[in-house]
Amino acid sequence: MSRTVLAAGCLVAAALLAATAGVGRRPRHRLRELNSPPPGPRQPAAGLPADTTDGEGQRRAGRRPDAVRLAAGLGGVAVAVVVGGWPGLLAAAPTAILLDRALRRIEPPAVRKRRLREAADLPLAADLLAAAMRAGAPVDRSVLAVAEALDGPLAQRLGRVGRTLLLGGGPEEAWSQLGPVSGAERLTAAALRSSHSGAALAGALTRLADDLRADRATAAEASARRAGVLVVLPLGLCFLPAFILAGLVPVIVAVLGDVL
């Protein structure tokens, strides 16, 4: 009984650590970033560190390695306690390694929320960029104006794009800030084509916004259909045994009784 309780306690602690491993930084760290001054005019655009391009993104909001390792270790201890003896000790290490790898592949909630928010704001950002460019604003000023108008993680990326362009950075370097955003590769390709050929970018951005909204509608419809299919599985698991016991078993017993 004590071994079962110990194993259950290890599993519960591992689950709690795995659930809290993706929690982002504390609010005071975010306030410190908000209060930090933007890069000055003397700072070169190429000096922007490559590992901080995501702001509060995947690198900073990722899972804490210490919590992941501890959760995997507790899972290995639970296996060792349940199995017992040398087999349990031998199975604990592979279990801990597999759990560590599996937990690291799970997308943290903060990263998922950021990714979905960026994808949702991208069509609006494309429309606002097109409107600003039709009004006569240059690309860098248009991007900075849209970054100021929007709110959220995509605005932070657009702000870095606009500042890089304003400080003289190349288009490839500037628009690469949008690389992790789902669907932004088409916006980046249109902006690079415009910078190289001089073609108008506003019309391409308007068409891109329409395409992104159509893609989101299609994805939402497919997700709704998939949810309807997945709901059938638990319903079948619940009703199929009852149907067999209440409908088929009495018929089979009656037929066997008549035959025998």
Image: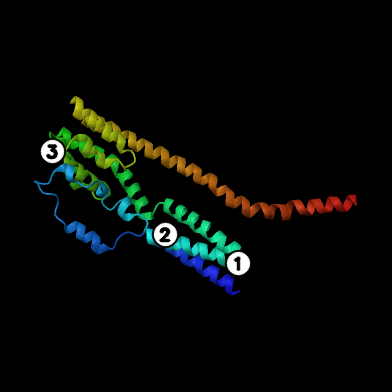
User: Picture coordinates of residue 75 (x, y %)?
Assistant: 50, 62
Mark positioned earlier in the residue sequence (1 or 2): 2
Query: Is residue 195 among what the camera can see?
Result: yes
| Identity, as a three-letter code, of the amino acid under mark 2 | Val
Image position, residue 114 (x, y; %)? 32, 50
Among numbered discs 2 and 3, the one appearing first in the sequence: 2
Mark number displayed over residue 168: 3
Read off the residue under disc 2: 68
Q: Looking at the rendered structure, which numbered label has been put on residue 85?
A: 1
- Numbered mark located on residue 121 in the image: none
- Residue 49 higher or lower than 25, as above or below: above
Q: Earlier in the sequence, mark 3 or mark 1?
A: 1
- How many residues crowd around disc 1 within 10 Å: few (fewer than 14), some, or many (20 or more)? few
Q: Please identify the residue farthest to the bottom as the structure is shown.
A: 2
Q: Quadrant of residue 122?
A: top left
Residue 84 in view in this figure: no
Query: What separation in Å lies between label 3 and label 1 (alpha carbons)?
Result: 66 Å
Q: Residue type at mark 1? A: Gly
Taking depth in this image into account, of 227 and 100 the one nearest to the observer is 100
Spatial separation of the CA atoms under disc 2 and disc 3: 42 Å
